[in-house]
Amino acid sequence: MSITLKFIDQIIKGGISLIFPPICIGCDEKLDNLNEVFCEKCWNSLIPLKQDFIDKKTIPDNLEFVLAIWLFDDLFQKIIHTLKYQMHPSIGSKMGKLIGEKLFIDFELYKKNTVIIPIPLHPIKLRERGYNQAELIGKSISIATSIPILDILKRKKITKTQTKMNREQRMKNMENAFDINITINSNISRAILVDDVFTTGATMNCAAKVLKKNGIKEVIGLAAAMPE
Ligand SMILES: [Zn+2]
């Protein structure tokens, strides 16, 4: 965009925001930052999870352990829905930045031989959505923690929506859903799999199985949220 066009664009955006001031989708309050979709107060209202909450869940076989940051409550659901279905990729970047800052100290331990791997979308879904929310989250975590991100997983099967499935059905649904697209460098011994939500872990477990089959020794699951 040329400087003149940029200037006109700014004037139009400024005019629109004077008539229709941008409102936070979470609480309907006026937003201070035009580039945000949810206000700081809403982000700060997300409920952080304690490790004993996560420890009560069954962790699938192929994951060493699981980290999840927030409770999947109504507010988180609103945020993730807006990210996935309303074309607001900036939410994914913001979410990853917050997660990266929270885990920065813990991840100091994991810097060596570790990579962040986002759970991929099937190419058809990616085309529909325009971006992969897990990749946006993973990229910002990578920037905040200096752990490199590797986009080596691919989804070879279109899986059904798992909302109404039980644990076994989810495992079956995810069977053989992933593959890798390059040979994994033998220096990499640990992967941090990143996804938006961890429910039963069926998705992460299948992805971890493929990574382990290809030489990665340890796989840690990292999700933005986990339901009760
Ligand atoms: Zn708000």
Image (tube, helix red, strand yellow):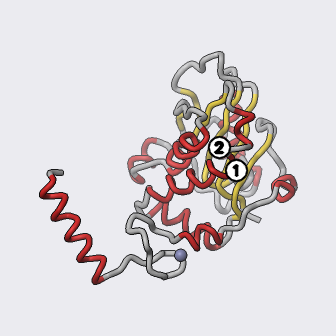
**Dot label at residue 170:** 1
Rendered position, 69 above or below 190: below
Residue depicted at x 39% and y 50%: 130
Residue 172 in sight here: no
Q: Secondary structure at mark 2?
A: helix
Residue depicted at x 15% and y 53%: 3
Residue count near mark 1 (Cα–Cα under 10 Å), binned few <14, some 14–19, many ≥20: many
Image quadrant holding the C terminus, namely: bottom right
Mark 1 C-beta closer than 8 Å to ligand 1: no
**Dot label at residue 174:** 2
In front of the other: 60 or 104? 104
Whole-angstrom CA distance, mark 2 to mark 1, is: 6 Å
Q: Residue 97 at x, y = what percent?
A: 56, 51
Q: Residue 43 at x, y = what percent?
A: 59, 67
**Dot label at residue 14:** none
Which residue reaches farthest top?
Answer: 186
Rendered position, 23 above or below 105: below
| Mark count | 2
- Please name the amino acid that badge 1 sits on: Arg
164 horizontally vs 128: left or right: right
In contact (CB < 8 Å): disc 2 and disc 1? yes
In front of the other: 94 or 78? 94
In front of the other: 100 or 56? 100
93 horizontally vs 223: left or right: left
Q: Quarter of the image holding residue 172?
A: top right
Q: Secondary structure at mark 1?
A: helix
Rendered position, 150 above or below 139: above
Q: Quarter of the image holding residue 153?
A: top right
Residue depicted at x 69% and y 26%: 112
Residue depicted at x 48% and y 82%: 29
